[in-house]
Image: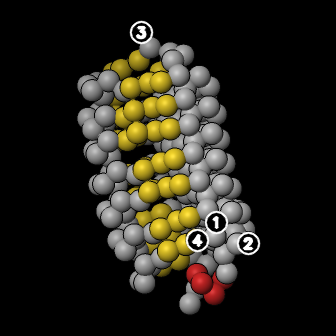
Amino acid sequence: MDFEIKDDVLVKYHGIDADVVIPNNVTTIGKGAFSDCISLKSITIPDSVTAIGNYAFVSCENLETIKIQKGITEICEGVFFDCIKLWNVKIPDGVTKIGKCAFAGCKKLGIIEFPNTLTEICEGAFFKCTKLWKVNIPESVTKIGHWAFRDCRNLELLILPNNVEIHKRAFTGCPKLKKDEIFN
């Protein structure tokens, strides 16, 4: 059995498939459930899933695409940390928070789509996403944390809402952004 499931929680994935669809009876993906799963290339998370544990997909070095259905309200700490081939992410409606280091080290991530329900981008959320070139922060976001976009070297287009609280080091190491465009 590829999926170890206890009380509707996917505790661990033991398979080697490249394309994985989480079963509809799962409500939670547990902490580290797919960690270091190097065969994984794509993951589909159904709307039955309402929570993804910290570091659930950490170091899935071949993971390229994720499809998250509605149901999730938070992208927790380090969920996709060091998924170095992840390149396109659409965060679904309903997500209000992107946790600490959630996408840190996703070096091929060039595009990220945020929902209008998002209110907070936490510390280091997109740290070292070196291919990220465009970020459009929705009006709903009220806070961008410390080092949220640190070392996003190719980030050149940033659209910010008027009343967002930005930590002064949120965009450190983004040489293509002009400081006066961020803090006006």
Q: Is residue 172 at least partly visible in the picture?
A: no
The quadrant of the rendering that contains the C terminus is bottom right
First in sequence: mark 2 vs mark 4:
4
Residue 86, image x, y percentages: 57, 42
From the image, state whether disc 3 or disc 2 is nearer to you: 2
The numbered dot on residue 175 is 2
Q: What type is the residue that disc 2 sits on?
A: Pro
Q: Which residue is mark 4?
A: 157
Between the C-alphas of marks 3 and 1, the distance is 43 Å
Q: Which residue is mark 1?
A: 155
Q: Nearer the viewer, residue 16 or 99?
A: 16
Q: Residues within 10 Å of mark 1 (few under 14, many from 20)?
A: many
Q: What type is the residue that disc 3 sits on?
A: Met
The numbered dot on residue 1 is 3
Q: Nearer the viewer, residue 144 or 175?
A: 175
Q: What type is the residue that disc 1 sits on?
A: Leu
Judge from the rendering whether residue 132 lies leftward or rightward of residue 116; answer left or right.
right
Q: What kind of element bears circle 4?
A: strand
Judge from the rendering whether residue 23 lies leftward or rightward of residue 154; answer left or right.
left
